[in-house]
Image (cartoon, rainbow, N blue to C red):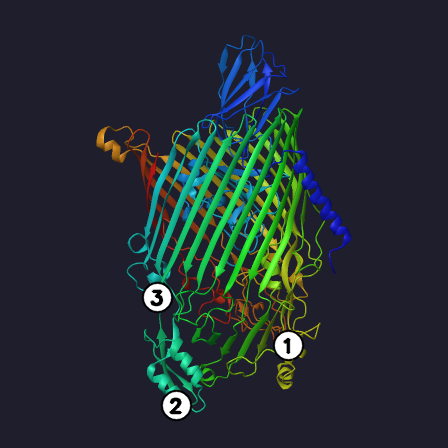
Amino acid sequence: MGTSVSLRRVLGRLLTSVGLTLLVTTSGLAQLPTAVVRGVVHDAQGGLLPGATVIVTHVSTGLVRSTTTNEAGVFRIGGLPSGTYRVRAEMESFEAQEGEANLVLNQEGELNFTLAIGGLAEQVTVAGTTPLIDTTRSEVSRTYTDRQIQDLPLAGRNYLNLTFRAPGVTHGGTGLGQGMGASVNGQRARNVNYVVDGSDNNDHSVTGDRSPIIQDAVSEFRVVTTLFAAEIGRNSGAVLIGSTKSGTNRFHGTLFEFYEDAETLNARDNLETASGLEKPAFMRRDTYGGTIGGPIERDKMFFFGAYQRRKLEEEGSLAAITSPTQEGRALLRAIPGASATMLDLLDEHVPAPNAGNFSTLDVAGVPIPVGDFVANPPAADDNQQVVARVDRNLSSSDLVYGRYLYGKTDEKGASNPPGFGNDTVFPTHNVVGTWNRVLSSSVLNELHVSYGRTRGSFPGSVDNPAGNNDIPRVGVTSLFAFGLADNIPQDRIEQVWQITDNVSYLRGNHAFKFGADARRIDLAQFTPFNFRGTFTYEDLGGYVLNTPQSVTQAYGQADLPFKYWESFLYAQDDWKVTPHLTLNLGLRYELVTAPEKFYSNVSTDTNNVAPRLGFAWDVSKRGALVVRGGYGIAYEQLFLNIPLLAGQQPPFQRRITDTAAAAMPFPTVPADRSVNPLTLNALEIPDDLRTSYSQQWQLGIQRQLGDSWAAELAYVGSRGLKLIRQRVVNPVVCCPQEIITDVEGRQALLRHGDPLQTGQITNLENSSSSNYHAAQLSVDKRLSRGFAMTFAYTFSKSIDDASESLATGVPSLQRPQDNFDLRAERALSSLDRPHRVSMSGSWELPWWKEQPHLFGYILGGWQLSATYSLQSGQPFTVITGVDSNGDGDSANDRPDLGTGDRRTPDGYIFRPARSGGQGDLGRNTERGPRTNSIDAVLFKNFRTVRDHLLQFRVEAFNLANHRQFELRTSPVERNLNSPGNFYNFQTSNGGSRTVVLGLKYLF
């Protein structure tokens, strides 16, 4: 089924609308990282003053903008860079007034003026501060300034970690998505939208951010968690908006180096302590670089640049393998029927034991000595980043800037046995151009174009011996394996072209905003998974005789191109109904086409309309007490890893698995390229796949407490609908084991249900849903008297029937226990964290600050900054580890719940389900350990010459050295079939305290 005529018309009309918008307006930018100043001008009697002139001047760059008040005495100037502004209001026959406003990213500063009768030459100065409470917006967001970004301890020097300081944000947990793993208000961890300088910064393949930014190059960072304005969309979780720094009229910059030496500075982790090691394994990380910005032409043109390099060297930690000794290898060659080819491969690729633990294995009646081989090859990681930006004030009405981001990650991966390492090469590029133009005192246009390119290459390793990157994957169960992993090599190039248009229009008490955003995504994927073949041997005897337990070979089309459009339209009206009541009214439309060529038969979802309704009511009428709330719909666009996996299925690729004995090399692929359909398993995308979405609502009250404190209490809820899950549509029809065994060669036909003529078919379908309810408390203190802090507490409950579309299987099951009883999967979400506490703060220590001479110079003026997180553990599901219900899948079977009373015969807490039956234990009934961590940094600025500073820093992560036993990607902790490791979190390292020393030079 091709694309319908009606769909072509819808797409054509949408793209025409985008084009017309670009022609009619001077063009603009959705989600542009700019600020707004607004206010009202009155006379001394409280009357409105239309026609008054308001002039704003950016202190750092000299940028000047002016406007006049409208018929309601209201002024609003947008498209401004963040920073400090002088704001002047003047009118004929009145005294002028001037104030100061500190504007931050994507927020509106308010400054009202009252003009007394007099001459323009007379001037009165009024105080202006950034309000603690936003009285005009219903959305819930948090903005972090440059000082917070630089002062707080951030693991990996990654500003995105500030996201976890906001209420409603939790660590998603193990096996639940890519990227930073932030679950926001019950949304899945993949549902996060990354924006940098107004441009798309998403990894469209696996999710996460595409181009990281150097911490010292970030000017502000904003986290929007719920009730987005209509201009924000694409994803249903948080929107993370970062802004890069720009130059000013003064030269400024930094030089920095951060050093970490695990052996000298870090504490031992749990496994190192249990092993009796006196110190942690070798690891050194060195991060260095600098920034510089300044004027090219004073008040007109500015530049900013940054560079950072991070080099990591560490001792590899690879699992031991078991291999025959030299004596054992000689004995193997004497066994009748032994394959010389297999034994030659053993000698060439699998080293003899070097770590003891000797034993013998029986091979054809001959005891073969074996032992452990342990390799600790060094691992290396070289990461480089560049930021370059130029800003130009063309006139008082025109501001343009261009920005370039570059990053490259080069990792060396090792293997055991050696010789099969895999390198990772990951270069990224992002270019942005922006033009803001003031058309009149009430109309602002913003044009934004960007291009991003990312390449992720996993080629094996150039350091591997010749030919090693090409041999099949060969493994002996529980002993050893050699050859590259079956998903290596792979390569992908992702390109994103974006053009976005905004027009802002002020009329009376209405602030209108309209926009269009068109993105072209081009992903070229090379995935010859298992094209080399995989040979699996049950034991050493099978390997020596070359009788595999199973052989898998794939072939077909390895190049999988994906090209599609993301197109968005929106309209927003912020209506100030009264001076103290604002309605935020918006409507958004999203259209994302199905990938071309490969998925032309998948219909495009064309009805994605998202209303946004909110209000903000200043109850106190002076900005001290605000009630805010609203309702909205947010859509979650499909990430490309899902169609990519489907593209590795028939008819694009075919994978043959033969469980009969088949010696190497693998038999020739049939000339007609056909295979027995009974051996084919498939991952299927339905042709009517719809866009997942979330209904979101909130109601809260915010109160200012004194001059520098504010507290907010809110109820936040969401309901996820049409969420994607995996479900087997033709599971095995359970029957007595003896029937399966007796009818040899017809097992696949007997075991799978409708359709009978294939192997297992797994659907990625819109059959999952979720709901979330939370009480969220936040307290903020603005910097005063050397102290600032934030506090957030979330009490929540999250319920769903599937927590991730592509779960790794731990702890969130990939598929339901009973594929035809999805209601039995309804339970606590794997994302459920009932309690989450997050705190951050900075304190300028008062001791010895005023002491003279060397004593005060060294001991005074220190600053302490810290973050603290306490979070409930991750829910997980207990499984039996065997195929109890006989559906051919042993990864989703749950046990029955016992009495737990040891005085009864059925005294177990969990017991295996009856053969052929479903376990009655629910999903996610158990919960892992909580996480409890504090990070801190102690630093001091030593003044050198003029206003130059030398900053010394000591950063400690997990300062108290608490063990953070999160669930691992191995299922042993929840598998009844592994009783020694069941619920035994001590088998993971649990993390440890790490210490980083830093030195910065600021000028």
Quarter of the image for residue 820 reads bottom right
Point out residue 182 in the picture as x, y percentages from the top left corner.
52, 50
Q: Secondary structure at mark 3?
A: loop
Point out residue 405 in the picture as x, y percentages from the top left corner.
48, 45
CA–CA distance between discs 3 and 2? 33 Å
Q: Secondary structure at mark 2?
A: loop
Q: Which residue is mark 3?
A: 376
Check disc 1 and give the amino acid type. Val
Q: Which residue is mark 1?
A: 675
Q: Is residue 646 visible?
A: yes
Quarter of the image for residue 785 reads top left
Q: Give whichever of discs 3 and 1 has the lower sequence position.
A: 3
Check disc 3 and give the amino acid type. Asn
Q: Is residue 160 visible?
A: no
Q: Is residue 670 left or right of residue 276?
A: right
Q: Which residue is mark 2?
A: 334
Relative height, residue 884 to residue 442 (above, below): below
